[in-house]
Amino acid sequence: MLMKTLDINLETEQQLFFHNYARLPLEIDYGKGSFLYTTDGSRYLDMIAGIGVNAIGYGDERLVGAITAQAAKYIHISNLFMQRPQFELAEKLLELSGLSSVFLCNSGTEAIEAAIKLSRKWAALGGNGEKREVLSLSNCFHGRTYGAMSLTAKPKYVEGYEPLLPGTGMIDFNDVEDLERKVSGRTAAVFVEFVQGEGGIHRVSEAFVRRLGELAAQHGFLIVADDIQAGCGRTGTFFSYEQFDVIPDIVCLAKPLGGGLPLGAIIGGEKVSGVFTPGSHGTTFGGNPIACAAGLALIDVLFSDGLMQKAVETGRLIREGIEKLAAKHARIQEIRQYGLMIGITVDREAKYYVEEALKKGVLVNATSQNVIRLLPPLTISLEEAQLCIDTLDEIFSEEQA
């Protein structure tokens, strides 16, 4: 039977899929460096990088080589067996974090779910039956599965899915007094994005982190760092929490960790290292050997190419460029930049700038309604970064004309 040629367009997308993505009308053919190329030959500068996943851009030969070499050996054998890529990746993550144990999964939201379970199991083993509460910060984003969604709790993400996971709640972001009111001896864990991504690129304050550490010691709860978007070098250090005087009890990683393949991890300190026992938590595909091989290659490239320092330097230059735009264009209200994690607050819906930049061959993202979010590959060149700045300048200028 002859197969008909499938039309790849938005109409076909509506026919085939649940309607939960607002896809761009682009069919991607391939990527190279910081650019994506469509099947009609158009080129787009990618300042989204797979929503922070493609930290070293597209087509890096070292990453592709690691994936290919492992695929030739075995693609999947399950966690019933010992696998060198898993062992080597776990060793590297423990070396970088100074923590004690690793659990490998498939995504950020799975890492959050595992961390919720680990926190509650740890509290239960401590003998306090009331210590079940898991808290997060307002304006956060931790994922789409039930526990992660319950910690996120933004109306647009949870409407119609209630009731949420019992025993969850929120602390007002950077509000030390609210932190003091909310935590208690019933608190098992507080989940923190040290730099909030979906919330619009906001950084936790030093004062908040300091008080959080004091209260964790007083009440005996865990600090869980969600480094899913801000980790793996994006803010200039491998973990974003390294920029604070804090050592989390659990760290969640994903997005760029697998170099573009599905890979997540939680890293736990000594407090929680013995909590999970055989059968108490697991995953079929977590720690896939190809994804782990890719993760090892990614980490090697980050360090060998000095990409974390490059993220700091390039991010600063992008910020300076946008500050010049802000002096010309009143629409720009605030710029927040931590390495190559950049938010530009504007005085209208940021979706407009996403659409206009797309017409000019630059892919940017909107989050938190009025924030233009830039998450370019850490490998982006200064010339490519300037192309993005010039494009935004054009859009703001045309808007004023």
Image: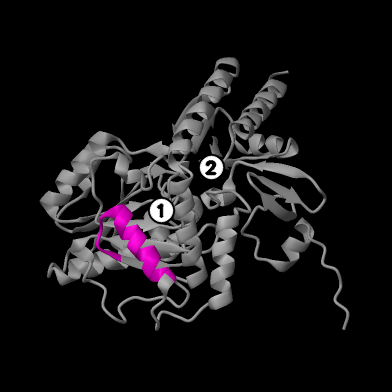
Visible residue check, residue 25? no
**Magenta residue span:** 85-101
Number of marks: 2
- Is 382 situated above or below 294? above
Q: Residue 363, how many percent across, how many down? A: 65, 41
Q: Residue 57, how many percent across, how many down? A: 59, 48
Specify the label residue 236 is tagged with.
none
- Is 115 situated above or below 317? below
Amino acid on which disc 1 is placed: Thr
| Label 1: how many Cα within 10 Å (few below 14, some 14–19, many 20+) | many
| Label 2: how many Cα within 10 Å (few below 14, some 14–19, many 20+) | many
The residue under label 2 is 375
Specify the label residue 152 is tagged with.
1
Amino acid on which disc 2 is placed: Leu
* Quadrant occupied by the N terminus: bottom right
Residue 113: quadrant of the picture: bottom left
Tell me the mark number nearer the camera, choosing from 1 and 2: 2
| Type of secondary structure dominating the magenta stretch | helix
The verdict on residue 100 being magenta is yes
